[in-house]
Image (cartoon, rainbow, N blue to C red):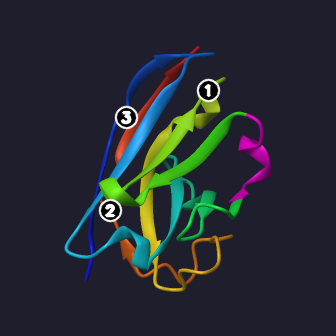
């Protein structure tokens, strides 16, 4: 079983950038595909980006294409979400999650096996 811990959230002005990290422990990160998700107050958790075990396959929600980049460093057992061009509507708790179906980059929140506890991103206008 893998444990996931997100970090890197905070308060940023609109147009700014943040890099979120997801550190894994207990198992090798390369055993999993990874996804980033977010949940704004009063809304359902939604898919943001996914990456397969090797990093060669990625998938993004339409609302972040061209602004966010998902990546991973298996040697460091860490996945990342680089966010730029942030908008107030990006304000949410961001979660990383791991899927044992490691060959396929996640496309949605269903089927993810392990979740972190989240990190809050607040974008001011």
The part of the image, by quadrant, that contains residue 89 is: top right
Tell whether label 2 touches label 3 (CB within 8 Å): no
Q: Disc 3 marks which residue?
A: 9
| Residue closer to the observer: 109 or 84 | 84
The magenta stretch is 59-66
Task: Give the distance between the C-alpha atoms of the residues marked 3 and 2, in whole angstroms.
Answer: 13 Å
Q: How many residues crowd mark 1 within 10 Å: few (<14), some (14–19), many (20+)?
A: some
Q: Disc 1 marks which residue?
A: 84
Q: Is residue 6 magenta?
A: no
Q: Which mark is residue 116?
A: 2
The image shows residue 66, relative to residue 18, as above or below, that is below
> Residue 14 at what x, y percent from top left?
60, 16
Tell whether label 1 touches label 3 (CB within 8 Å): no
| Residue closer to the observer: 39 or 12 | 12
**Which image quarter is the C terminus in?**
top right
Tell whether label 2 touches label 1 (CB within 8 Å): no
> Residue 56 at what x, y percent from top left?
66, 62
| Residue closer to the observer: 6 or 10 | 6
At 45% from the left and 76% from the top, the residue drawn is 32
């Amino acid at each position: 079983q893998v444990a996931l811990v997100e970090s890197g959230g905070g308060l940023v002005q609109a147009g700014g950038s943040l890099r979120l990290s997801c550190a894994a422990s207990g198992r090798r990160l390369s055993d999993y595909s990874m996804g980033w998700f977010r949940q704004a107050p009063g809304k359902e958790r939604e898919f943001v980006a996914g990456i397969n075990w090797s990093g060669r396959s990625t998938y993004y929600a339409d609302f972040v294409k061209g602004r966010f980049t998902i990546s991973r460093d298996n040697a460091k057992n860490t996945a990342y979400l680089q966010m730029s061009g942030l908008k107030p509507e990006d304000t949410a708790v961001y979660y990383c999650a791991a899927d044992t179906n490691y060959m396929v980059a996640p496309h949605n929140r269903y089927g993810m096996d392990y979740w972190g506890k989240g990190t809050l991103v607040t974008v001011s206008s």
